[in-house]
Amino acid sequence: MASTGGNEAATVRTERREFTRRALRLAAPYWNSARKWRVRGATGALLLLTLAQVALAVWTNYWHRELFDALEARSVAGVLRQVAVFALIFAVTLAVTAVHLMVKRWLQLDWRRWLTDRVIGRWMATGRHYRLLFTAGEHDNPDGRIAEDIRIFTETTIALAHTLVFSLLMLGSFIEILWSVSGSLHVPGTSLHVPGYLVWLAFVYAGSGTLLGWSFGRPLVRTTNALQTAEADFRFGLARAREHSEAIALLHGEPLERTNATRRFQRIARTWYRQSRAYMGIVSFSTGYGALLPVFPILVAAPQYISGAISLGVLMQAAQAFQRLTSALSWPVDNLGDMARTRASIDRVLSLYEDMERLDAEARVPDGHRITIERAPKARLATQELCIAEPDGRIVLERLDLEIRRGERVLVAGDPAVTSALFKVLGGLWPWGSGRVLLPGDGALLFVPQRPFLPEGTLRHALCYPHAVDACSEEAILRALECSGCAWLAPRLDESDNWEQALPLRAQQRLGFARVLLRRPAWILLEEATDAFDPRGERLILEMLRHELPNSALLTISFHSGLEALHDRKIVLNRLTETRFLFNGRRVNGASSH
């Protein structure tokens, strides 16, 4: 049994060291960032201001001694002198506290900004935010992890670091003070004298409180982590309902959405009550511990005062020093809740960041189970021995050899799951499979999905997205709107609205083509980008593209009949009829070309 307990303790220590190493690897480079001297300067200033706070606490401790000695001596002049000294202490304390607050909050916000930029920079690069949806791991609700957990981690870590340094400095300062003023305690009936006995009592008092506090507070770590996860799930569900409010309203899905929201909140409530029970134990203990703290040292040192061994000032100084020392020693218990919240938050951020790192590491491994994307030296878009699989390895398409040259119009039809996967493969979003994709080296590709992304803001901003509005001239915007059949939107260019909600799908798709005309790419890939059009409108918009961009290649994924005449050739992609996996080495051709 002892061996088992020792192994468990060693495992816990190893896990803590590993967690600390991972957290430092993510967040510590902030102090070596491009603004390192300003950051280090703020950190040094925070340390100096903390030293000033400790010095003021020591000064206040000695001031208490002088004040109560003056009161005991009934000296009016002495009391007035201490009043003047206190006014000085008060003014300096206000100044140090104000400056300390501003420096600390600047450092908290700046660290949060740096870490947020680092995580978002990785999340919003090369389609990771999309690929994460199909990979295993603890990275649900990345928006909550970035917005809330990074805030909690950075703010609370700096606050905890400050209070820890402050407590350590107070510990060193007030051990010496309490040792000097407490004298020695004579044990009755013996010749034993205990020097600095109040110091030993402070350690016993704080040590007992720490042990009991940890035992009462251990459940708080687990329940805090669970509660933060439940809160994030609840926020995510509400945000998803807001994003799809139109579809929910049309399907009359409000009762089910209310049920889902209630279910998620019930999970919050259950976890909240578990956390409340954990808090009840730690708060009850802390209340009793704190209520006894001011009284205990006075009662212990009262016999020395009554016997005349110490003055009233020394008694009060010893009592205050005892409180300061035990408060410093009780730092772990006092900050247990904040440490639990910080641990839970950094764990959630680490899970997201490390899953993105793992995604990149898997993409770099040449194991034959990833699609290779390269730039071709020629003006062509090609696939070689392309195999497309689902994330679990189930093959949907095999051995696709395709070549599209500049200026060609190619129609892609067949199984929607396969054509959609091909669109994502060409866009670099779908790495699962094998084979090669050769992207053209003579120009950029523009992908036009079924529903173009129209960010909130002005219509001009939505049209120029992802570029700045000054990248598009007024003349070019007006012509693009006219050619795409959206001239009626020209007066609203500088209006702000939620365009995905304000405009019907057909108008949104026309804006997608207006964006094509503004970008004028050499290669255009359409994925059901005209499925909201009637046959005549579909024909007109594709003829317009041929007229405006005669040298651009066009790859159209569509299932509408009648489009073959508008393209040079047609490719039909069929899904494998049998269940096969990427790892078994067998191949079946699932593509045919006409």
Image: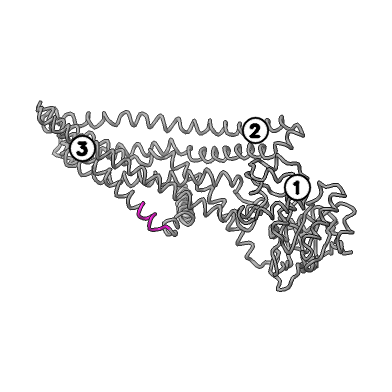
Q: Name the residue beneath numbered marker 1.
A: 486
Dot 3 lies on which element? Answer: helix
Single out the mark in the foreground, 3 or 1.
1
C-beta proximity under 8 Å, tags 3 and 1? no
Residue at 62% across, 52% down: 469
Q: Which is more N-terminal, label 1 or label 3?
A: 3
Q: Name the residue beneath numbered marker 2.
A: 261
Q: Residues within 10 Å of mark 1 (few under 14, many from 20)?
A: some
Check the image and report above or below for 21 versus 204: below
Where, by quadrant of the figure, is residue 95 drawn?
top left
Residue 414 picture location, percent across and down: 85, 56
Dot 2 lies on which element? Answer: helix
Q: Name the residue beneath numbered marker 3.
A: 88
Closest to the observer: 424 or 171?
A: 424
Q: What is the three-letter code of the residue carrying label 2? A: Ala
Task: Work out how far the residue at label 2 is from the one at label 1, CA to CA, in angstroms.
Answer: 39 Å
* Residue stretch rendered in magenta on the structure: 35-42
The quarter of the rendered structure image containing the C terminus is bottom right
Magenta run includes residue 59: no
Residue extending farthest front: 475
Residue 440 picture location, percent across and down: 72, 68
Q: Residues within 10 Å of mark 3 (few under 14, many from 20)?
A: few
Where, by quadrant of the figure, is residue 386 drawn?
bottom right
Residue 86 picture location, percent across and down: 20, 34
Q: What is the three-letter code of the residue carrying label 1? A: Cys
Residue at 60% across, 49% down: 139
